[in-house]
Image (spheres, rainbow, N blue to C red):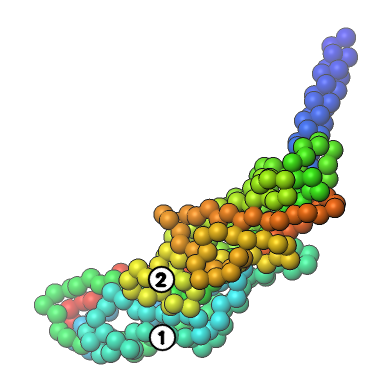
Amino acid sequence: MKKIQIIIMLVMVAVLTLGQEGCESGENGKNGDKVNTFIGGTTGLNIQYAEGAPPEEIFDNKQWTFDVEVKLKNVGEADISSEDVVVKLTGLNPLDFGKTESDFVKDGINEDIPATKKDFEGNIIDSPDVFVTFSGLTYQSALPGNQKLQVRADVCYKYQTQAVAFYCVREDVLSVDKDAVCQITGEKVMFNSGGPIQVTAFSEQPSGSDKIRYLFTIKHQGTGRYYLPSSKCPAGRVAENKIHFKIETDEDLTCNGLIDGTGTEGDILLNNGERVIQCVQNTGVKTDYEDTLNVILTYDYKQYFDQELLVKKSI
């Protein structure tokens, strides 16, 4: 009798489990069939120093010559052109190390920094490390005692995030038929390529009988600072907190809040790292369908990496 009771309980557990899985599949059915071709993530460049460059400690009075070697690895999904990278050493007075200010700035580097990729089988192909070297630094003066300095590498680079939004178009925009091929109202599926600025949400709603309104929430998700593309992260606030927004679509679409652009492309200002962009599409179609909008966010991005350097008094 106990064996029968145990078997019945196991059967009931199995049925409940399958039922739950079926509900989850049904609830997410229209999202589950979307294929994300991106790796994702909120980082563009990973910045470090090569081992021993700079060293942890040196001696003063021209007793020690060393290099600073900045290691750049592109863990996001946008290629970086060599001409769109600026690497600057800060935290050190160039004159103290026998250099000029221009010696501590490299506007453009020797090679491109390719993106991390996903191949057609879903395998991740890592980006190779790229090194930027500041060579031949020597502390010039004799110190009265040991001194700690901060060696910082500021890196500015042009980057891009691509987002794919799945949207619905209906012949009858105001219809709420449950058996329709798709529904206009509500949150929609959104995929982003790896990068520090993302489209974190996308929703759709009717706007009259022949228009659809799209809402894109754009957020800064990284730890650095962002600027207008190709501005090279200048000092001051003119270019900071601004990015370039573009929608690639064949639809009759117009977006608001775009500076110096068209209905689907222009600069935007993020307030406290966030902005909601509204776009309106004229419909007038004779069929229902689901399609994608490609959103391209382009910007210059500034990050840094620093390490303590101990300058010892030589005997």
Q: Residue at x 64, y 55 (%)?
A: 280
Residue drawn where x is 69% and y is 50% of the image:
212
Quarter in which the C terminus is drawn: bottom left
Q: Quadrant of residue 4?
A: top right
How far, Cα to Cα, is label 1 from label 2? Answer: 21 Å
Residue 42 in sight: no
Foreground of the two, 311 or 81: 81
Which residue is at a point 41% across and 54% down the rendered structure image?
A: 272
| Circle 1 residue | 106
Image quarter of residue 119? bottom right
- Residue appearing at x 67%, y 69% in the figure: 117
Asked if marks 1 and 2 touch (Cβ < 8 Å), the reply is no
In the picture, measured across the screen, residue 160 lies left or right of residue 177, that is left
Please indicate, yes or no, whether residue 185 appears anywhere in the rendered image: yes
Q: Disc 2 marks which amino acid?
A: Ala
Q: Which mark is residue 239?
A: 2
Q: Amino acid at mark 1?
A: Lys
Image-based side of 131 in relation to 24, left or right: left
> Mark 1 or 2, which is nearer the eye?
2
**Horizontal placement of 124 versus 215: left or right?**
right
Q: Secondary structure at mark 1?
A: strand
Q: Position of residue 112 (x, y in %)?
A: 56, 83
Q: What is the quadrant of the N terminus in the image?
A: top right
Residue 155 image offset from top left, x and y in percent: 43, 74
Seen from the viewer's position, the closer of residues 88 and 271 is 271
Is 61 placed above or below 313 here?
Answer: below
